[in-house]
Amino acid sequence: MTAPAYPDPRDRLAGAIPKLRAFAISLARDVSKADDLVQDTILKAWSNIDKFDPATNLDAWLFTILRNTFYSSLRKTRREVQDSDGFHAASLSVKPAHDGRLALQEFQKAFDSLSPEHREVLILVGASGFSCEEAAGMMGVAIGTVKSRASRARKRLAELLHLEDGEDMFSGTDGATQAVVLRSAAGGF
């Protein structure tokens, strides 16, 4: 006994379009959105035709795809903000990226010119946030040595960056830029 031969479901897709369109219009309440929905449905069906069982109802399968596509797009549009006047977009601003890039380049150059011991202590105590005691254990030196190296490393870095006493290299720079600079320095070690 052989399995019954079913016609290729691809050949039946075009015949289902009028019913799909009527269903899509009833869901979307907009003809152009409904047409887009039908097009997406046919495209998804065509791409996944190997998952369709020819012994089942093609229309039911297509209607399920259309319905799921409609509700997925509805969920996505609920997260969008209607801003036809552009007021919301006009209120947004972004800090220029070049400030952070320049600060990173300057910092990286100065950091790279430090001795390996100074880079190591700044990465451990400064960038990674370890205590002097923890850094001392990792480096195999006394706590006083870590504190001394950290102090000298910070002083040397400030000299290389031409910073005055108490001046912060990142004054006026947001926390995200500072984190990128410090993370880059830690990754470059």
Image (spheres, rainbow, N blue to C red):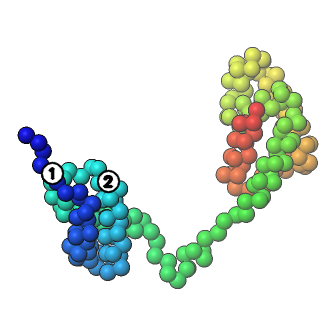
Tell me the residue at 72%/36% (across/down).
186
- Residue hosting label 2: 48
Q: Is residue 100 visible?
A: yes
Which quarter of the rendered picture does the N terminus lie within? Answer: top left
Tell me the residue at 19%/60% (across/down).
58
Amino acid type, residue under disc 2 in the picture: Asn
Which secondary structure, mark 1? loop
Tell me the residue at 73%/63% (across/down).
96
Q: Is residue 71 visible?
A: no
Q: Nearer the viewer, mark 1 or mark 2?
A: 1
Circle 1 packing at 10 Å, graded few (<14), some (14-19), many (20+), is: few
| Up/down of 181 relative to 24, above or below | above
Residue 7 percent across, percent down from the top left: 19, 57
Q: CA distance from mark 1 to mark 2?
A: 20 Å
Nearest the viewer among 181 and 175 is 181
Left or right: 82 as drawn, with respect to 109: left
Disc number for residue 131: none
Q: Which residue reaches farthest left?
A: 1
Residue 167 percent across, percent down from the top left: 84, 50
| Up/down of 162 relative to 10, above or below | above
Of the numbered discs 1 and 2, the one sitting upstream in the chain is 1
- Residue hosting label 1: 5
Circle 2 packing at 10 Å, graded few (<14), some (14-19), many (20+), is: few
Tell me the residue at 84%/48% (across/down).
106
Amino acid type, residue under disc 1 in the picture: Ala
| Quarter occupied by residue 63 | bottom left
Residue 31 percent across, percent down from the top left: 32, 81
Nearest the viewer among 65 and 173 is 65
Which quarter of the rendered picture does the C terminus lie within? Answer: top right
| Quarter occupied by residue 23 | bottom left
